[in-house]
């Protein structure tokens, strides 16, 4: 038995039957509820078992819910549950994986800036550690140096003392003294020279030249002090961190840090 049309109520024969939305329609009766445009199985949209075109398909509207105390309590409870779940997932996934960050130009610039800041801090700490001793320590070092120099020169003075005494008039004693002098000259005897620490070499004009870019105070006796802008001549490289040269302004010669100067 043939069914009836859902719109006109007449019998629908198989040749013109459309089975859609759980109903049977004539092909001509299967149209939009608003604009009456004829639809087919490809372009229709159903709403409450009625056909609509795409332009007149009913839009669902949402009702506003007032923030009643009960709703606020439920909202707060749901937020607490979300936080608990988030913490549980965070604890489970902690330390399991790391995301690889691309080496972008911005990250390279930030890394370079951090390296420069680290170098500046290193120079500041280096200068503090290389600062000269306190006044009390300096006085103690000068006293020790004076004692050492006095003890070193004492033998030479003792050797020179006999020359100031009046030699006896005994001919035998004079003959022995002459023989001792001749023997000392024949063997190339020389008096001991002054300590090397008291000698100062005059700077020569050759060698590599560097310019100081920071002030530096000598921390040891074998180092030299200089100021920003001083010229260092006759520079010789000792290792990656230290050089040996002469400060042209003061004439002092000794070791100096390589990262405090630049080549001219």
Image (spheres, helix red, strand yellow):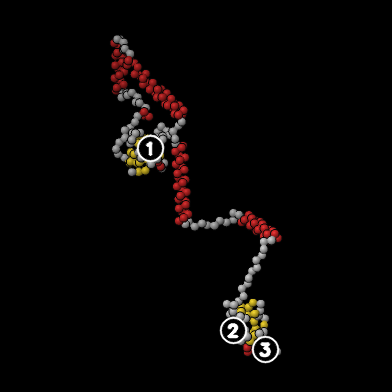
Residues under labels 2 and 3: Cα distance?
18 Å
Depth order, front residue of 16/255: 16
Please say if the residues under marks 1 and 2 sit with CB atoms less than 8 Å apart. no
Q: In the drawing, what numbered circle is on residue 227?
A: 1
- Spot occupied by residue 42 in the image (x, y as percentages of width and height): 59, 80
Residue at 33%, 32% in the rendered image? 201
Q: Secondary structure at mark 1?
A: loop
Residues under labels 1 and 3: Cα distance?
111 Å
Please say if the residues under marks 2 and 3 sit with CB atoms less than 8 Å apart. no
Depth order, front residue of 3/86: 3
Q: Which circle's residue, 2 or 3, is located before the other in the chain?
A: 3
In this picture, residue 61 sits left or right of residue 201: right
Residue at 30%, 36% in the rendered image? 204
- The answer to which image quadrant residue 84 occupies is bottom right
Which residue, as the protein is rendered here, is positioned at the far top? 169
Q: Secondary structure at mark 2?
A: loop
Residue at 61%, 78% in the rendered image? 45
Depth order, front residue of 259/170: 259
Q: Which residue is mark 3?
A: 10
Residues under labels 1 and 2: Cα distance?
96 Å
Q: Is residue 39 visible?
A: no
In the picture shown, does residue 189 fall above or below 94? above
Q: In the drawing, what numbered circle is on residue 38?
A: 2
Give the number of the mark in front: 1 or 2: 2
- Spot occupied by residue 5 in the image (x, y as percentages of width and height): 67, 86
- The answer to which image quadrant residue 264 occupies is top left
């Amino acid at each position: 038995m043939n069914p009836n049309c859902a719109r006109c109520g007449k019998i629908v024969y198989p040749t013109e039957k459309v089975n859609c939305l759980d109903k049977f329609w004539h092909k001509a009766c299967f149209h939009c509820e608003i604009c009456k445009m004829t639809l087919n199985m490809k372009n229709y949209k159903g709403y409450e078992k009625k056909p609509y075109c795409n332009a007149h398909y009913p839009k669902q509207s949402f009702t506003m819910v007032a923030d009643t105390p009960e709703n606020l309590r439920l909202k707060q409870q749901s937020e607490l549950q979300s936080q608990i779940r988030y913490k549980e997932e965070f604890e489970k996934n902690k330390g399991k994986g790391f995301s690889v960050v691309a080496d972008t130009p911005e990250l390279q610039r930030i890394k370079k800036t951090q390296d420069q800041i680290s170098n500046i801090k290193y120079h500041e700490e280096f200068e503090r550690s290389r600062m000269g001793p306190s006044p009390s320590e300096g006085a103690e070092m000068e006293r020790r140096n004076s004692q050492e120099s006095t003890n070193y020169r004492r033998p030479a003075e003792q050797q020179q003392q006999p020359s100031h005494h009046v030699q006896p008039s005994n001919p035998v004693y004079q003959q022995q003294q002459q023989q001792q002098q001749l023997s000392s000259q024949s063997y190339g005897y020389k008096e001991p020279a002054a300590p090397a620490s008291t000698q100062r070499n005059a700077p020569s004009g050759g060698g590599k030249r560097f310019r100081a870019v920071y002030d530096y105070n000598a921390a040891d006796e074998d180092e030299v002090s200089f100021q920003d802008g001083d010229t260092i001549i006759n520079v010789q490289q000792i290792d990656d961190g230290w050089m040996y040269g002469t400060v042209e302004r003061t004439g002092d010669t000794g070791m100096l840090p390589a990262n405090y100067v630049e080549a001219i």
